[in-house]
Image: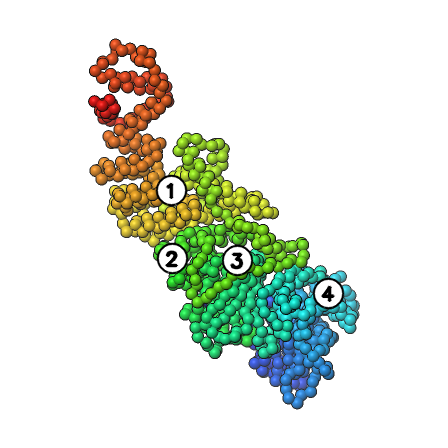
C-alpha cells in the first residue's frame, strides 16, 4: 500500500486486557462482601474520548448500570490508570485531563432512556464539571446549560514540573469560546502551599474554586479546530456573510495572541456548527454536527498553511474539493467524477496530513496525494481512481487527522501513524503507465527517503530499464534535480524558493479523471510583528509571495555564459587573471574530493582519472555562482554552512551521474577491457553508450557539470560502437567530444590499417590546432609528418618581417636553379638560428625527413606555378 498505517494504540489490545483485570478485581471485592463491583462486562461501551498533546489517550467505559468510568493510557509508559468514575447513567460529550493528571474536565448529558428523571441540574441539558482526581475531594460545576459544551486543557511548552495555573478552553454550541484560569495549590500532609514553591509530584487542589477567572476569546464562530501539538486554535467567523479564518496561539505564560486573519472564499451558514479535534464522542456523528462542511487546517515545520475544504455533496456523481495554499498565495479546486456509487463508503472524504503532502481520500473511489511544498504543477501530485487497487488502502470508517501524521479511527479505537510507504512507491513506479504518475511517484519517494542511497539505487535501476518510457519529461534530468534538491532541503528553510525542485517549468497535459481550477487568493493578514519558529517561516513564505517576482530559483545561465567566455579565452590564448581561474579550479578540486570521500566502494567506471579542465571549470563556476546566490538570499545563515551546502549539492549532482554509470556497468557486467580498441563492441557496450548519451543530453539541457573522464569514456565507447560516418556525425554535432586523453589512446592503440588511417585522419582534421599538433607527434605516419612540418613552417613565418635580399644572403653562395627553395630554406634557417629555444622543432621522432623534403618541393612548385 502507498500508505503505511502503524498502530500506536489499540483499545482492544492496550486497554481491554487491563480492564478485564480491573473487572475481575471488582467482582472479587463484591464476592467478599465489599458490595457489588462498579464495573461490569460491557465492552461495547469502551471508546476513545480524547488524545492530548503528550499523546496520552483518554477513554471511557460504561457498565450495564450506566456507571461511567474514565481511564487514561500513558503513551510513554504504555500503562493504564483509572482517573474517575461517575456512578450515574450519563453520556460523555467531551473530556480532557491536565498535564499533571490531577484535574479532569468533562461535559456530560443525560443518557437517553425512557422514564428516567433528569439526574443533572434542573433545566440543563449539559453539565460541565471540573474534578480533582489526585486527591479525589472536589467536583466543581463550570457550566450547567441547555447546550453542548466541549472542553480542552492547554499543554504549554514548559519543563516537566507542574505549573501554578492550569488553563481550560470551553467551546459552546452557542458559538463562543472561553478560557478558564485554574489556580492550584499542593497538599503535603496537613500543609497547603502554592505550587510554584514546591517540588514536582505533590497532590494538587483547586484554590478558590468558587470563583475561577475566565475570559471570552472568540464569539460567533461556525467552525473550530484544535491543534494539540502546537497549541493553536483555528476558527472561522462570519463577517458580513464572509468567512474569515483566524488563529490563536497559546503560550505558557498565561497569554495568547491572535496570529492572523485570512478571508476564505467558501460558503458557510451561520446555522451550522463544526468542531475538529475536540474529542471524539457519539455526538460527532449526530446529524446536526456531521452533515456540514468538511474542513481542516494543516501546517508543517516548513511554514506551510493549507486549508482543505469539501462542501456537502449534492450528488454522488462528482465531488469537488478545494485546497487553499496560503503559503503560496493561491488555491486549487479539484473536481472528480465518480465512476460508480458504492453505498458502503463513508459519508464524506477524508483529509490526512502527511508532512510534505496532504492526502484526499474517498474509499473505493479515489486517492489524491497533494504536494503542498510544490503545488504549482499538478504532475507533482498523485491522483489514483477506482481502477487502481491503491484506493482501498485505508479503513472505510471515518478517520480524524490529528497533529503531525497521527490519525484516529474512533470507531475501532485505534491511533495510527500514517507514513508514505517508500517501498510500495518504488514498486508502483515500475508499474505506472502515465507520465504524470511517474513524475509524482518519483518526487514522493525521494521526499520521504529514509535510506537515500538504497532508494536512489532502486530508482536508478528502474530508470536504466525505462530510459525512454517518459515522453513529457526527461527521467534522468528529473531524478538528478529532485534527488539533489531533497539531499540539501532539510539543511535550512527557504531552500524550496532558491533551488530548482523539478526540471519542468510548466505542465499542460490533463490528468485523467480530474479537472483543476487555480485562483489567486488574498494572503493572511499577520496580526503580530515579532515571529519565532513556525510563524517566522510562515511570514517568510508570505513575504516571498508578495515581493519575489520573478522566482528566485537558481539556474545555470550565468555559469553557461561565463564558461563559454573562459573557453573562448583559452582558444585565443587570452586568459584572464590566473588567481581567478585558480580559485575556480580549487572549487572543483574540493567537489571532486568530496565525491570521492563519500564513495565507499571502488569504482568500476574509469572516472576522475584525468584532468578534464573544461569540466573542472564548469564545476568550479557552478560552486561559485550557487554560493553567491545563496549568500544573497539566505539571510542569517553562516557563510561556512552555506559553503558546505553548496559543496554537498554540487557533489550530489556528480555523484548521481556516477551512480547511474556504475549501475549500468554492473548490470551489463562490463570490465576494463571494454576500453580497448582492438575488440569488437558488445551489446552491453552499446547499452552503456546509449545510457551515457542520454546522460549527456540531460545535463547539456540544464548545463550541469559531468565527472571528469566522462567525455573520454563516452568517446572511446563511441569509437567502438559506431560506424565511421555515424561517429563523425556525433562528433560534428557535439555529442562526442574529442578529449586529448581519448584521442591519445586512439592514436597509440590502433594500428595503421587503411580503415584506421581514415579514422585517425578524420579525427585529426577535427581537432583544435593546439591539440592537433600534440596528437600528430604520437602518430608515426606521413600524414602526421606533413601536418607537423606545415605547422612548424607556419609558426616560423607568422612574425617574419621581410628583409632586402642583400641583407639576408649572398647571391653567389646559392644555385640559381632552385632559387625559390634556396631562398625559403635560408629564411627558415635564419629564423630558427635567431632564437633556438623558441623555435626548436619538436616531435622529430615521428617525422620522415625525406617526406618533408618532397612535400616542401611539391608545395613550392605549386605556389610558383611550375
Mark 2 → mark 4, Cα distance in angstroms: 61 Å
Mark 2 → mark 3, Cα distance in angstroms: 24 Å
Q: Earlier in the sequence, mark 2 or mark 4?
A: 4
Q: Earlier in the sequence, mark 2 or mark 3?
A: 3
Task: Depth check: give the residue in front, 10 or 505.
Answer: 505
| Element marked by disc 2 | loop
| Element marked by disc 1 | loop
Is 595 located above or below residue 55 in the figure? above
Q: Which mark is residue 373?
A: 3
Q: Which mark is residue 470?
A: 2
Quadrant location of the N terminus in the rendered image: bottom left
Task: Depth check: give the residue in front, 38 or 736.
Answer: 736
Q: Which mark is residue 709?
A: 1
The image position of residue 485, as x and y in percent, is: 49, 52
Mark 1 → mark 4, Cα distance in angstroms: 69 Å
The residue that appears at 48% across and 58% down in the rendered structure is 377
Question: Do the CB atoms of the residues marked 2 and 4 lie less than 8 Å apart?
Answer: no
Q: Which mark is residue 739?
A: none
Amino acid at each position: 500500500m502507498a500508505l503505511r498505517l502503524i498502530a500506536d494504540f489499540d483499545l482492544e489490545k492496550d486497554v481491554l486486557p487491563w480492564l478485564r483485570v480491573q473487572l475481575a478485581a471488582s467482582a472479587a471485592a463484591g464476592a467478599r462482601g465489599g458490595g457489588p463491583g462498579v464495573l461490569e462486562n460491557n465492552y461495547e461501551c469502551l471508546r476513545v474520548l480524547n488524545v492530548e498533546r503528550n499523546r496520552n489517550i483518554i477513554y471511557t467505559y460504561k457498565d450495564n448500570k450506566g456507571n461511567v468510568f474514565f481511564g487514561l493510557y500513558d503513551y510513554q509508559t504504555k500503562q493504564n490508570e483509572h482517573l474517575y468514575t461517575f456512578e450515574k447513567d450519563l453520556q460523555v460529550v467531551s473530556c480532557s485531563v491536565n498535564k499533571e493528571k490531577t484535574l479532569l474536565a468533562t461535559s456530560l448529558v443525560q443518557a437517553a432512556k425512557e422514564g428516567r428523571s433528569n439526574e443533572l441540574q434542573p433545566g440543563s441539558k449539559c453539565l460541565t464539571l471540573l474534578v480533582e482526581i489526585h486527591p479525589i475531594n472536589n467536583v466543581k460545576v463550570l457550566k450547567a446549560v441547555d447546550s453542548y459544551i466541549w472542553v480542552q486543557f492547554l499543554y504549554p511548552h514548559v519543563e516537566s514540573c507542574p505549573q501554578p495555573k492550569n488553563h481550560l478552553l470551553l467551546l459552546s454550541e452557542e458559538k463562543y469560546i472561553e478560557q478558564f484560569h485554574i489556580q492550584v495549590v499542593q497538599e503535603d500532609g496537613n500543609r497547603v502551599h502554592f505550587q510554584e514553591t514546591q517540588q514536582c509530584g505533590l497532590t494538587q487542589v483547586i484554590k478558590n474554586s468558587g470563583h475561577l477567572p475566565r475570559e471570552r476569546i472568540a464569539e460567533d464562530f461556525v467552525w473550530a479546530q484544535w491543534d494539540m501539538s502546537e497549541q493553536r486554535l483555528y476558527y472561522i467567523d462570519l463577517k458580513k456573510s464572509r468567512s474569515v479564518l483566524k488563529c490563536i496561539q497559546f503560550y505558557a505564560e498565561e497569554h495568547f495572541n491572535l496570529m492572523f486573519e485570512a478571508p476564505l472564499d467558501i460558503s458557510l451558514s451561520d446555522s451550522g456548527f463544526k468542531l475538529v479535534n475536540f474529542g471524539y464522542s457519539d455526538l460527532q456523528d449526530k446529524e446536526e454536527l456531521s452533515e456540514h462542511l468538511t474542513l481542516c487546517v494543516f501546517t508543517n515545520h516548513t511554514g506551510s498553511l493549507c486549508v482543505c475544504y469539501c462542501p456537502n455533496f449534492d450528488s454522488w456523481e462528482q465531488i469537488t474539493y478545494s485546497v487553499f495554499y496560503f503559503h503560496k498565495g493561491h488555491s486549487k479546486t479539484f473536481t472528480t467524477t465518480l465512476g460508480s456509487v458504492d453505498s458502503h463508503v463513508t459519508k464524506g472524504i477524508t483529509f490526512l496530513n502527511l508532512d510534505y503532502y496532504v492526502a484526499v481520500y474517498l474509499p473505493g473511489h479515489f486517492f489524491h496525494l497533494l504536494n503542498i511544498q510544490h503545488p504549482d504543477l499538478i504532475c507533482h501530485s498523485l491522483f489514483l481512481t477506482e481502477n487502481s487497487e491503491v484506493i482501498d488502502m485505508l479503513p472505510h470508517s471515518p478517520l480524524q487527522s490529528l497533529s503531525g501524521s497521527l490519525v484516529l479511527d474512533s470507531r475501532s479505537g485505534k491511533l495510527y501513524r500514517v507514513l508514505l510507504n517508500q517501498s510500495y512507491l518504488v514498486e508502483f513506479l515500475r508499474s505506472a503507465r502515465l507520465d504524470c504518475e511517474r513524475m509524482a511517484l518519483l518526487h514522493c519517494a525521494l521526499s520521504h527517503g529514509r535510506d537515500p542511497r538504497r532508494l536512489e539505487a532502486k530508482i536508478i535501476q528502474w530508470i536504466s530499464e525505462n530510459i525512454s518510457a517518459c515522453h513529457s519529461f526527461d527521467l534522468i534530468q528529473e531524478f538528478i534535480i529532485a534527488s539533489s534538491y531533497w539531499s540539501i532541503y532539510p539543511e535550512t528553510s527557504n531552500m524550496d524558493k532558491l533551488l530548482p525542485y523539478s526540471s519542468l517549468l510548466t505542465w499542460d497535459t490533463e490528468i485523467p479523471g480530474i479537472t483543476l481550477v487555480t485562483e489567486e487568493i488574498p494572503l493572511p493578514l499577520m496580526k503580530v510583528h515579532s515571529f519565532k519558529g513556525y510563524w517566522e517561516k510562515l511570514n517568510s513564505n508570505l513575504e516571498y509571495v508578495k515581493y519575489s517576482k520573478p522566482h528566485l530559483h537558481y539556474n545555470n545561465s550565468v555559469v553557461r555564459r561565463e564558461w563559454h567566455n573562459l573557453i573562448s579565452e583559452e582558444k585565443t590564448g587570452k586568459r584572464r587573471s590566473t588567481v581567478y581561474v585558480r580559485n575556480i579550479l580549487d572549487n572543483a578540486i574540493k567537489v571532486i574530493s568530496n565525491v570521492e570521500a563519500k564513495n565507499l566502494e571502488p569504482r568500476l567506471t574509469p572516472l576522475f582519472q584525468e584532468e578534464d579542465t573544461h569540466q573542472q571549470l564548469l564545476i568550479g563556476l557552478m560552486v561559485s555562482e550557487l554560493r553567491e546566490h545563496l549568500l544573497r538570499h539566505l539571510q542569517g545563515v553562516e557563510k561556512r554552512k552555506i559553503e558546505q551546502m553548496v559543496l554537498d549539492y554540487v557533489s550530489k549532482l556528480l555523484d548521481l551521474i556516477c551512480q547511474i554509470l556504475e549501475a549500468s556497468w554492473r548490470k551489463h557486467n562490463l570490465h576494463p577491457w571494454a576500453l580497448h580498441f582492438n575488440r569488437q563492441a558488445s551489446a552491453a557496450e552499446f547499452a552503456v553508450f546509449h545510457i551515457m548519451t542520454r546522460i549527456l543530453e540531460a545535463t547539456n539541457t540544464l548545463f550541469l557539470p559531468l565527472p571528469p573522464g566522462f567525455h573520454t569514456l563516452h568517446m572511446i565507447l563511441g569509437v567502438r560502437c559506431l560506424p565511421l560516418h555515424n561517429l563523425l556525425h556525433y562528433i560534428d554535432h557535439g555529442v562526442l567530444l574529442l578529449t586529448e586523453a581519448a584521442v591519445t589512446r586512439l592514436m597509440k592503440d590502433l594500428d595503421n590499417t587503411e580503415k584506421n588511417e581514415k579514422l585517425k585522419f578524420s579525427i585529426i582534421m577535427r581537432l583544435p590546432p593546439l591539440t592537433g599538433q600534440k596528437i600528430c607527434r604520437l602518430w608515426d605516419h606521413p600524414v602526421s609528418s606533413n601536418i607537423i612540418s606545415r605547422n612548424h613552417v607556419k609558426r616560423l613565418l607568422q612574425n617574419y618581417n621581410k628583409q632586402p635580399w642583400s641583407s639576408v644572403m649572398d647571391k653567389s653562395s646559392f644555385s640559381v636553379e632552385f632559387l625559390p627553395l634556396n631562398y625559403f630554406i635560408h629564411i627558415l634557417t635564419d629564423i630558427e638560428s635567431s632564437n633556438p629555444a623558441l623555435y626548436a622543432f619538436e616531435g622529430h621522432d615521428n617525422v620522415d625527413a625525406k617526406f618533408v623534403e618532397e612535400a616542401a618541393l611539391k608545395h613550392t612548385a605549386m605556389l610558383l606555378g611550375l
